Image (spheres, rainbow, N blue to C red):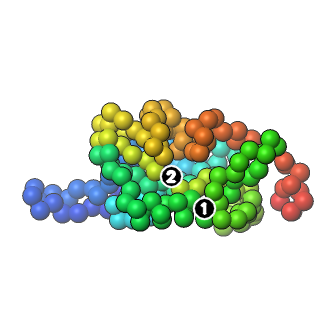
Amino acid sequence: MTRPFYQTYHCQHCGKETTMESAFSRWVRGKPELHSSRAGISVVDLDLTGEKKIFHRFKTPETGRDIFYLMCVEVKIHDGILSDSQADTLITLNQLISNRRKTPTKKKIYAQIMPAPNFIFSWMLGRRVRFRAMGAHLLQFSGQGPEDSEKIKWDHHEISIGQLVGLLLFKIDPHTLRPMDLRVHHRKDLKIIGL
């Protein structure tokens, strides 16, 4: 179940308590298909404004809790752009938290510092699980959020609200904007490491 948003501030103009939640955060919280209980999604804010987020999908209908997906998203509103230092930080973070693998066709792997782990230990489950770290990405709105924006961009590519939902559910690959295969293809690997 998605928890209520508790951070508030006292408005100096009207004197009332109001939430500090951004339009995008409110949209994510209000989207039934993104609710944590239904979709197995956890969202963590990395800054006070709530515009740097980690999306973690810990459960899918296809794999249950056998694979965890994770990505970092930097949100910019009103066609905001990254400063040079912000872009450098996002590119660095992308290299640190990506664990893309070579494909059978030997296609290019997206920039990453070195091979990252395929498995992590889940404290909640008390066991190791497969892990897909999908990097860090830029999400730009022409307005305040998805509902009032004429344009939505993901890593400088224009997308629809439906594609945005697919990206946040890890159904669309955040690097290629193509459908992702959420199945476990190498179940025998789980037995080898004792899972």
Secondary element at image label 2: strand
Residue placed at 56% from the left, 59% from the top? 94
Q: Position of residue 69 (x, y in %)?
A: 63, 52
Q: Foreground: 97 or 110?
A: 110
- Left or right: 192, with 48 as reference point: right
Residue occupying the point 74% across, 44% down: 107
Residue 45: which disc?
none
Q: Which residue is at a point 61% across and 35% down the rendered structure image?
A: 178
Which quadrant does the C terminus fall into?
Answer: bottom right
From this view, report whether residue 147 is shown above or below residue 99: above
Q: Is residue 145 visible?
A: no
Residue at 11% over, 62% down: 12
Q: Amino acid at mark 1?
A: Gln
Characterize the local packing of mark 1: few (<14), some (14-19) or many (20 or more) Cα atoms within 10 angstroms.
some
- What residue type is disc 2 on? His
Q: CA distance from mark 1 to mark 2?
A: 11 Å
Residue 144 location (% of width, % of height)? 30, 45
In the rendered image of this protein, does residue 153 appear above or below residue 76? Answer: above
Measured as percent of width and height from the top left, residue 114 is found at 70, 65
Q: Which residue is mark 2?
A: 137
Name the foreground residue: 57 vs 162: 162
Residue 47 appears in view: yes
Residue extending furthest toward the left: 13
Callout 2 environment at 10 Å: few (<14), some (14 to 19), or many (20+)? many
- Residue under pointer 1: 95
Badge 1 or badge 2: first in the primary sequence: 1
Classify mark 1: helix, strand or loop.
helix
Snapshot quadrant of residue 30:
top left
Where's residue 134, x and y in %? Answer: 61, 52
